[in-house]
Image (cartoon, rainbow, N blue to C red):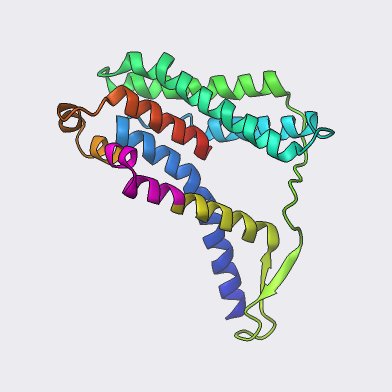
């Protein structure tokens, strides 16, 4: 039984991490009707950017914080540029055009990331505890083995999901996003600017990446 719970927890923790990537897909599709095939490439580009910046700034003050801030800023600008330069001109175009556009963005980001940051392999150490711990020892004989890295990453991912849920449920912009997701024309008729909303959606997708 303990082994079953261990496998179950591992699967749940992996699922929480994957849900962040899925969230980027859903955000853009619901608000604009575009299935963003470039979301995976955005995640890869963000990871490459963070790792390389961390290596470049390793001797500076608070390298992890600086690298994270710069990476977030770059992803926000990248997402806004994609929306403004590529997808906005394709509004009301056939779905295949949008599909090919996001597919092209994915290939572009793959190549651009390797050109900008290189294709070398780097290790990432941001201070997350390593090793494994046993939990639920009072419930199961010998306890359940859980990797500390997975546990910390799951907590962080869970907090991000909760934060985004509160954003969509409680804030004015979040409610506007939901209105656009339900009905584009109705949202536009009551004064919600679709272009502005799509910029926000792509920005949030960039942040999630």
Q: Is residue 164 left or right of residue 73?
A: left
Q: Residue at x 70, y 82 (%)?
A: 142
Asked if residue 22 is among those painted magenta in the image, a careful observer would answer no
Which is more toward the observer, 22 or 151? 151
Counting labels gives: 0
Location of residue 115 by image quarter:
top right
Span shown in magenta: 163-176
Query: Where does residue 16 sit, x and y in percent of width and height?
Result: 51, 55
Query: Where does residue 33 sit, x and y in percent of width and height?
Result: 30, 31
Location of residue 25 by image quarter:
top left
Which image quarter is the N terminus in?
A: bottom right
Query: Where does residue 55 sit, x and y in percent of width and height?
Result: 79, 32
> Does 24 appear above or below 142?
above
Location of residue 182 by image quarter:
top left
> Does 46 appear above or below 174?
above
Q: Residue at x 21, y 31 (%)?
A: 184
Which is more toward the observer, 69 or 93? 69
Query: Where does residue 41 sit, x and y in percent of width and height?
Result: 55, 30
Magenta stretch, overall SS: helix
Q: Residue at x 43, y 47 (%)?
A: 164
Q: Is residue 92 left or right of residue 113?
A: left
Q: Residue furthest right?
A: 59
Asked if residue 175 is among those painted magenta in the image, a careful observer would answer yes
Q: Is residue 137 left or right of residue 16?
A: right
Q: Residue at x 37, y 34 (%)?
A: 28
């Amino acid at each position: 039984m303990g082994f079953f719970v261990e496998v179950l927890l591992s699967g749940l923790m992996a699922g929480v991490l994957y849900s962040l990537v899925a969230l980027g897909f859903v955000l853009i599709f619901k608000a604009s009707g575009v299935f963003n095939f470039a979301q995976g490439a955005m995640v890869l580009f963000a990871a490459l950017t963070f790792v390389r910046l961390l290596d470049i700034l390793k001797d500076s003050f608070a390298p992890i914080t600086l690298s994270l801030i710069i990476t977030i800023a770059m992803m926000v600008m990248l997402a806004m540029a994609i929306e403004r330069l590529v997808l906005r001109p394709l509004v009301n175009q056939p779905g295949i055009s949008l599909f090919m556009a996001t597919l092209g963005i994915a290939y572009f980001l793959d190549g651009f990331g390797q050109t900008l940051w290189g294709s070398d392999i780097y290790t990432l150490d941001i201070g997350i505890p390593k090793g494994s711990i046993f939990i639920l020892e009072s419930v199961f004989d010998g306890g359940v083995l859980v990797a500390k890295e997975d546990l910390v990453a799951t907590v962080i991912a869970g907090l991000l999901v909760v934060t985004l849920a509160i954003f969509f449920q409680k804030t004015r912009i979040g409610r506007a996003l939901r209105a656009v997701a339900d009905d584009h024309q109705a949202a536009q008729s009551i004064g919600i600017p679709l272009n502005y909303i799509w910029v926000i959606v792509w920005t949030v997708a960039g942040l999630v990446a």
